[in-house]
Image (cartoon, helix red, strand yellow):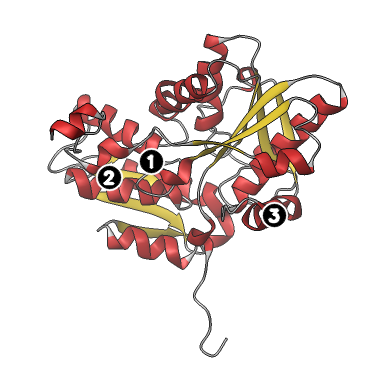
Amino acid sequence: MADAARFGVRPLASIVEAVGRTPLLRLHALEAEEGLLSAGVELYAKLEFQNPGGSVKDRPALQMILDASATGRLGPKKGVLDSTSGNTGVAYAWIGAALGLRITLVMPENVSDARKQITRAYGAKLIFSDPMEGSDGAIRLAQKLAAQRPDEYAYLDQYGNPANPKAHFLGTGREIWEATRGRVTHFVAGIGTSGTLMGTGRRLKRENPAVRVVGVEPDDPFHGLEGLKHLRSSIVPAIYRAEDRDETLFISTDEGWSMAERLGKRVGLLVGHSSGAAIAGALRVAGRLRDAGEKGVVVTVLPDRADRYFEPSRPGA
C-alpha cells in the first residue's frame, strides 16, 4: 500500500469510480496521410470506450442516476426507466447492478443482439418498441410507461435531463482542456442525445470562448450511423441548444463506415460507425485549417468499440 500511495494509485471502492479520465490519443497516422503534420494541425481522439461499460454513455448515465438519487427520485420501490438504442442502456444496466438499483430499458426491437445480451447479463429488464419507429418510438413508449406507472418508475429521460450534458461539462470537457494544456482550438462530436457536444462544448468555451464547437449529424434520415440523430427528421432532444455549437457537418453512412474501417487498419482502433463519422468530421475541420495555412488542435470523441455491433456468424460461415 505504501508503493500504491507513492505512485498515486489507490484501490477503487466501487467500479463506478472508474468512469471517466479516459485517454486522449494523438492520431499521428491520419495526420501524416492527410498532410496535417507538416501543416501544424494536430488531431486527437478521446477514447471513451475505455470506460467500464465500454462507451461514452457511462458518464451521463452515472450522473443522471447520482442526481436522481440525491433528490430522492430513486429508492427501493422505484427503479430507473429510460429509452435507449444501446449504449446508454448498457451503462444504466451495469451501474444499476453496481449500486443495487432496478433498471428497465425501452429499446427498438432491432438493436444488436450484443446490446440485448449485455444489458440482460447485468440484470436489466428489457421492453421492446416498434423497430420501424427507431429511437423516437422507444422514447414515446418510455414516456407512456412512466405516465402509467409513476410509483414504479423514475423516468430519467436522457434526451431531456440536464445531468446528461452536466457529466461532460464536469468531466469530458475538463479532461480535454487539461490534456491539451488549453491548446484545443476545435471540438467535434456526433449528435445523438447531444449531451457530449453540449456539455463538453460549454466547458471548453468557458475556458476559451474562441474554441469552435462542431456537431456531426447523418446526412440522411434513413442512415446507418447508429447512435446519431438526423435532427431535422427526429425528435430534437430537449437538452440540445443550436446556439451552443458553431457549425454542423453532415456525414454519409458510407463515409462513417469507411472511416471506421480505416481506423481499424491504419490506427489499430476497432470503433463503432458513429466514431467513424466523428473522425470524418474532425478531418474535414482539420483539412480546412491545413488548406487555409492555419495551425490548430482538433479533438473529437470515439464513443464506443466496433465489437458491440458484431453479430454472431451463421453456422459454417
Relative horizontal placement of residue 139, taking residue 279 as reference (left or right): left
- 141 left or right of 92? right
Q: Position of residue 302 (x, y in %)?
A: 55, 42
Secondary structure of the residue carrying numbered label 1: helix
Apparent side of residue 104 relative to residue 42 in the rendered image (left or right): left
- At label 2, the amino acid type is Ile
The residues tagged by marks 1 and 3 sit, at their Cα atoms, a distance apart of 26 Å
- Front label number (1 vs 3): 3
Give the residue number, with chain letter if any, for mark 2. 95
Mark identifier at residue 301: none
Q: Circle 3: is it few (<14), some (14-19), or many (20+) Cα within 10 Å? A: some
Q: Residue at horizontal 18%, vertical 33%?
A: 3
- For disc 1, the marked residue is 58
Task: Name the residue located 81 percent from the left edge and 36 percent from the top edge.
Answer: 35
Circle 1: is it few (<14), some (14-19), or many (20+) Cα within 10 Å? many
Q: Indicate which disc residue 262 carries.
A: 3
Residue 163 x/y as whole percent: 38, 27
Q: Is residue 212 left or right of residue 17?
A: right
Q: What whole-number distance in Å separates the C-alpha atoms at marks 3 and 2?
A: 32 Å
Q: Amino acid at mark 3?
A: Arg
Q: Does 305 sit above or below residue 237?
A: below
**244 lies above or below 93:** above
Quadrant of the rendered image containing residue 182: top right
